[in-house]
Image: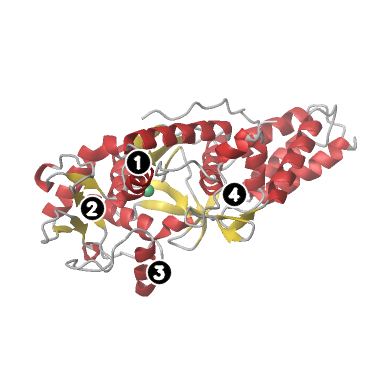
Amino acid sequence: MDAWTGHEVPKLPGNATPPELYDSSRRGVFPTTSGPAATMYVCGITPYDATHLGHAATMITFDLVQRLWRDAGIDVTYVQNVTDIDDPLLERANRDGEDWIVLAMRETALFREDMEALRMIPPAHYVGAVESIPAIAAHVRELIAGGAAYTLDDGTGDVYFSIAATPSFGYESNLTRPEMLTLSAERGGDPERPGKRDPLDPLLWRGARDGEPAWDGGDLGPGRPGWHIECATIALGLLGNRIDVQGGGNDLLYPHHECSAAHAERLTGESPFATHYVHAGMIGLDGEKMSKSKGNLVFVSRLRGDGVDPMAIRLGLLTGHYRSDRQWTDETLKSGEQRLARWRAAAEAPTGPSGEALLAAVREALHHDLDAPRAIAIVDTWVEAALTATGTDPEAPKLMSRTVDALLGIRL
Ligand code: ZN
């Protein structure tokens, strides 16, 4: 599948070091890589609806990781998937009487447009679940052959992964078993299903059902893949047995990332699958959680259609730390627009305080677990000074503009 078109990222003077990031499994901030290369897998959308601000905030988080690695001279390989076959997609297509393929293609195209408008550096590989089915089915067969998976004996052909097959199951999310049971039920798992060896065992392959699309699974019979094995297979195929960062929203901590790591580790015999499991906070709207069930999603494409500058959306989302669950309000957007206007005015100022000092301070703020709010405050201080003509460096406005473009993805 094709990704979107990227923009040129300015090269900045001086040296930077790769960022330190919070890893959910070790529950602390640790260096990512010492170079020369880094790999990142970010869980992408299930294209049944348009990109909302929560998706955008997650994607911006990992866009910053990529920008900081590149600034440090790291050779980055970034993979993102699109879950173009799964239950939510079929449910939405059925609800609206639409062909699921048409729905998936339309929403994926819209997502690409949104990503381009928000100036996300595209992944090296943008991969769909459907195009990965032969590789996924081969992994499921391998897990069965190795005793790590089993077929339910209820005639459905459904295959489950045995969590007992990985001794370290639970290390990534650090949750208790009761917490895992609750989240499994809430997030697409089926702990109540009879016949499973363990209620937490996740689905690897869903046998064909009437009215649902199905693909040839060889010995598995016709069916379609589970979500966790989809990400494990795509990541292993393109990035190798061990990746530097697996990323997503914090609602993927469990079961998705825990299970995809367990699948990958059982397949390769290497652990951990990812050095860092990195999770972005959720975006709420006016004090409420933003969710499809509440019907209060704010779509990036809708804001764009209303004439909002995507850079103001990006700035608004960056004013809260990426790990925090945070709120989006009219005020967030308004202050994003005002800040963007001030920054643009300052970029046109004849002089400003030292551009090198600004660049060093922004790099330093982002280096420690992507402290974008602090980086923005540093730029704000510089901007106020430039607008009141207190600086004397004629090159500084240009360097300020390049700095926020390259490191924050804000094009002035
Ligand atoms: Zn995933």
Disc 2 and disc 4: Cα gap in Å?
Answer: 34 Å
C-beta proximity under 8 Å, tags 3 and 1: no
The residue to which callout 1 is attached is: 97
Q: Name the residue carrying label 4.
A: 370
Quadrant of residue 119 within the rendered picture: top right
Label 1 vs 4, first from the N-terminus: 1
- The residue tagged 2 is 204
The C terminus sits in image quarter: top right
From the image, state whether disc 2 or disc 1 is nearer to you: 1
* Alpha carbon distance from label 3 to label 1: 39 Å
Q: Is residue 221 left or right of residue 238?
A: left
Query: Separation of disc 1 and disc 4 at Cα?
Result: 43 Å
Query: Does residue 11 sit above or below 268 in this rendering?
Result: above
Relative height, residue 200 to residue 401 (above, below): below
Q: Which residue is the site of mark 3?
A: 175
For marks 4 and 3, the one nearer the N-term is 3
Task: Please tell me in which quadrant of the rendered image residue 170 appears.
Answer: bottom left
